[in-house]
Amino acid sequence: MVTRRIKSDPSRVTGTVATGQKFESTLEEDFYVLLRFNPWVEDFEVQTVQVPWTDKEGKRHTYTPDVLVRYRSDVPLEDRRPPMLCEVKPDLDAEGRTVGGRTRKFRKENSEHNTLKWEAAEHFAAAKGWGFKVYYESDIRTPYLENARFLLAFLERSVEPRSETALLNNLARMGPMTAGDLLATITTDRQDRALILPTFYHLVATGRIEADLTEPFTLKSTVRVPEH
């Protein structure tokens, strides 16, 4: 399958995430963190789709969206989602210039070209039964991202069975409480709590313990048993 080659650019960061996908910028890397943490995502491919588009002068071009996301099919029919072509973009200032990043330089975005490219991508995706969406920096870099980045380290960690059972049973029996209070139902000893924390974070990462991850997650955050 033809893919766009990532060019050398001293103003950009390039690399590979833990699952092997390449990224051109730290913003793309952050977006891939969200995808890896999303329990609905089955897999995603980076820069594997090429979309033809035509500019105002009639010249033909090829546009490569950043990532194609596929969602899980082993869920109830009403919860299934079509694949999504995604573009990741920095936020723009009032003059259409990208802001932030590793340098203080600005890069002017061609809004006219972007509009044409993205319209072509929408039609291309729709013809395949997919969706298309542009994600901006302000959509990606939120407290949820920081929580996802932290909890990813615990997502596939093994758990201590007795701590797992005690945490879930105590929370179900006593109802919503702060994370710190839940840990205190098992032990108030700092060293013992440190041994329990990986299991606790694993339960939060896998959704077996629920918390509002759109806000900074601390031991003062409220946790509860999911309703479903």
Image: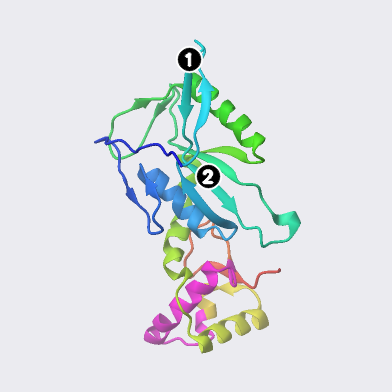
Give the image's coloring scheme.
Answer: rainbow
Q: Quadrant of residue 207?
A: bottom right
Residue 24 at x, y percent in the picture: 35, 42
Mark 2 is surrounded, within 10 Å at the Cα level, by few (under 14), some (14 to 19) or many (20 or more) other residues, namely: many
201 within the magenta span: yes
Q: Secondary structure at mark 2?
A: strand
Residue situated furthest right in the rendering: 78
Q: Where does label 2 land, which residue?
A: 68
* Residue at horizontal 38 percent and vertical 59 percent from the top: 18
Residue 151 at x, y percent in the picture: 46, 65
What range of the chain is rendered magenta?
A: 183-210
Whether residue 9 can be seen here? yes
Q: Where does label 1 land, which residue?
A: 59
* Residue at horizontal 47 percent and vertical 66 percent from the top: 218
Residue situated furthest left in the rendering: 10
Quarter holding the C terminus?
Answer: bottom right
The one of 187 and 33 positioned closer to us in this rendering: 33
* Residue at horizontal 37 percent and vertical 54 percent from the top: 17
For residue 107, side relative to residue 225 (left or right)? left
For residue 106, side relative to residue 120 (left or right)? left
For residue 206, side relative to residue 97 (left or right)? right
Whether residue 144 can be seen here? no
Residue situated furthest front in the rendering: 1
The one of 54 and 108 positioned closer to us in this rendering: 54
Residue 95 at x, y percent in the picture: 43, 21
* Residue at horizontal 53 percent and vertical 55 percent from the top: 43
Of circles 1 and 2, which is in front?
Answer: 1
Q: Earlier in the sequence, mark 1 or mark 2?
A: 1
Q: Secondary structure at mark 1?
A: loop
Q: Amino acid at mark 2?
A: Leu
In the rendered view, would you say 141 is above or below 163? above
